[in-house]
Image: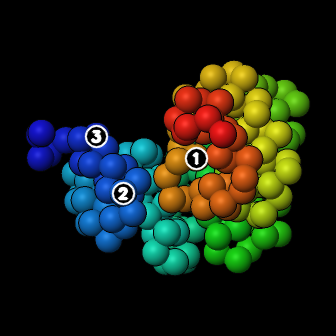
Amino acid sequence: MDPLSRFANTVVGIVLLGASRNDDAIGVLEKALEIEGDFVLTLNVLGAAYSRCSRHDEATALTERTTLLAGRGAFGLGWLGTVYAAAGQPAEAEKLFQELLAKAERDYVPPPYMVWPLGALGRLDEAFSYVDQAYEDRHPFLVFHMIPNFDSIRRDSRYLELLRRMKLAPAA
């Protein structure tokens, strides 16, 4: 691995975050930002790591920054809504979800981007309708529901059924 590759360091951070090694992920991701400070992927993943560690002010500030850098795209709006919900700011999360809905009337918004804030807000029936759509679309981001950031989804019995449909869990 190239130790000066922002992308390689970010991928290591993603793997560490997926393994719930949040502090290790933060260290690697902060190093990646020293290499290039405005790499949106690194900023997003670091925001997720901060959120997992209840460092909500840092997570919110970083995710707001990435959303602006990326032009308020659907990914950023969905992720920022998730971070706001985790930070105990459901009204802000709801505003972002409404912005996503408006965007979805004009353009395609991938279903996982809708799932993230809905799950974080505890609106699981709505979230799982988008999970089902993501499954039907075979959207590659569906696998992100297997990392710890989506505990609200993972605790629901419909999650096990999703894993079975994806052939990632034994049949009932």
Report how far apart the C-alphas of labels 2 and 1 lie in the structure: 13 Å
Residue located at (78% from left, 70% from top) = 90
Between 162 and 43, the one lying in front of the other is: 162
- The residue that mark 1 highlights is 145
Disc 3 versus disc 1: distance between alpha carbons? 22 Å
* Sooner in the amino-acid sequence: mark 2 or mark 3: 3
- Position of the C terminus, as image quadrant, is top right
Q: Earlier in the sequence, mark 3 or mark 1?
A: 3
Q: Quadrant of residue 81?
A: bottom right
**Against 49, is 109 above or below?**
above
Other-residue count near label 3 (Cα within 10 Å), few / some / many at <14 / 14–19 / ≥20: some
Query: Circle 2 — which element?
Result: loop
Q: In the rendered structure, find residue 7 and report the number of the disc placed on it.
A: 3
On the image, the x and y values in percent for residue 112 come to 67, 39
Looking at this view, name the residue that lies furthest to the top. 137
Q: Amino acid at mark 3?
A: Phe
Circle 1: element type: helix
Q: Which mark is residue 19?
A: 2
Q: Looking at this rendering, what residue extends furthest in the front direction?
A: 172
Q: In this orientation, which residue lies closer to the viewer: 70 or 16?
A: 16
For residue 82, side relative to residue 123 (left or right):
left
> How would you rate the neighbour count of disc 2 (Cα within 10 Å): few for under 14, some for 14-19, many for 20 or more?
few
Three-letter residue code for mark 1: His
Name the residue located 28 percent from the left edge and 40 percent from the top edge: 7
Quadrant in the rendering for residue 93: bottom right
Residue 113 image offset from top left, x and y in percent: 68, 42
Q: With 92 as the anchor, is 74 left or right in this view? A: left
